[in-house]
Amino acid sequence: MNFENKEYDAKFKELISSAFDSGRLPHAIILEGANASKRLEAASLLAKALVCKESEKSLRPCGKCPDCIKAESDSHVDIKTVIGTNKSKTVSVEDIRNVRSDAYVVPNEAERKVYIITSAHKMNETAMNAFLKVLEEPPSYVNFILECEDKAMLLQTVKSRCASFRLGDLTDDSVTKKKLEASFENAVKIAKAISSDSEIEMMKTLGMFEKDKDALKLALEEVILILRDSIALKSGAVNCLSQNEDVAKEIASSMTSEKIIKATEIVNDTLQSMQYYANHNLLLARLSSRLKD
């Protein structure tokens, strides 16, 4: 992907380029961190690359084809920026329903349709649930880009259907930089325990979270990214989307695809169950048992 000399975090550019150039960019992604203007700039650049006619993906957006020129002037009919129509400019359930209906109309000019959902972190639960219906089974030609201050503010059901890319440090105080760094380290420990044959190792690792439900939630969200990378590696992918490529490779070499997929489903199910389980220790015991069953 061509970043047109724009200044972005090096890791962000590496991950996006790897996914885009290899054709592995998911149909729905979350752009978080940095500030709103930077996120929207990155979303617009990616949308332009997705509709670009240049045959070499690493050169998209080319800036020269008719689609790029229209995208640059914000007049491309197949790129939709969704801004809330209410007074607070928050994307509402009605806005999402309109997106859902429009998504099933084939592209007008480009090969793809791209929807940029602005301030996705401000959507209420009803709007997010309405969005799920198209996220779960989107048309093959559609891409969704959720511009989001902090993915922690989205429903787990939405996050689990998107890949997240961070442009820089999060600006929201609800998730500090220290907590994020800890979540990466904790995710590695859990992922390694999953690939281990030791049930005791899994119990000991999950035992670290007996008194910290929030830390477990953040770690498991990263674990899902690692497991998804492991599945992709087993399918022939070269690069990873998570920040733990070594661990993903380790899992890919030690577990079958079926076991990795099962572990991913268990972790995702646990994340969704966390909002309902009153007994946190019981949830940990259940997670440990299911992963080592």
Image (spheres, rainbow, N blue to C red):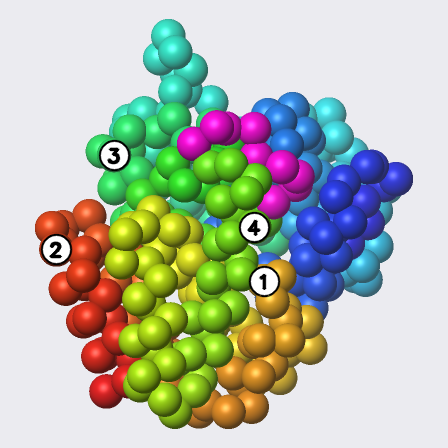
User: Where's residue 268, x and y in %?
Assistant: 31, 63
Depth check, mark 1 against mark 2: the one in front is 2
Q: Residue at x 44, y 84 (%)?
A: 195
Labelled disc at residue 279? 2
Dot 3 or dot 2: first in sequence order is 3
Determine crowd level at label 3: few under 14, some 14-19, many 20+ residues with C-alpha closer than 10 A.
Answer: few
Q: CA distance from mark 3 to mark 2?
A: 24 Å
User: Where's residue 199, x and y in %?
Assistant: 31, 86
Q: Judging from the image, what secondary structure is the residue with disc 1 in? A: loop
Q: CA distance from mark 3 to mark 4?
A: 28 Å
User: Majority secondary structure of the magenta segment?
Assistant: loop
What is the three-letter code of the residue carrying label 4?
A: Glu
Determine crowd level at label 2: few under 14, some 14-19, many 20+ residues with C-alpha closer than 10 A.
Answer: few
Dot 1 or dot 2: first in sequence order is 1
- Residue to which mark 1 is pinned: 242
Q: CA distance from mark 2 to mark 4?
A: 27 Å
What is the three-letter code of the residue carrying label 3?
A: Glu
Q: Residue at x 68, y 54 (%)?
A: 16
Depth check, mark 3 against mark 4: the one in front is 4
- Residue to which mark 3 is pinned: 125
- Residue to which mark 4 is pinned: 181
Range shown magenta: 166-174
Q: Judging from the image, what secondary structure is the residue with disc 3 in? A: helix
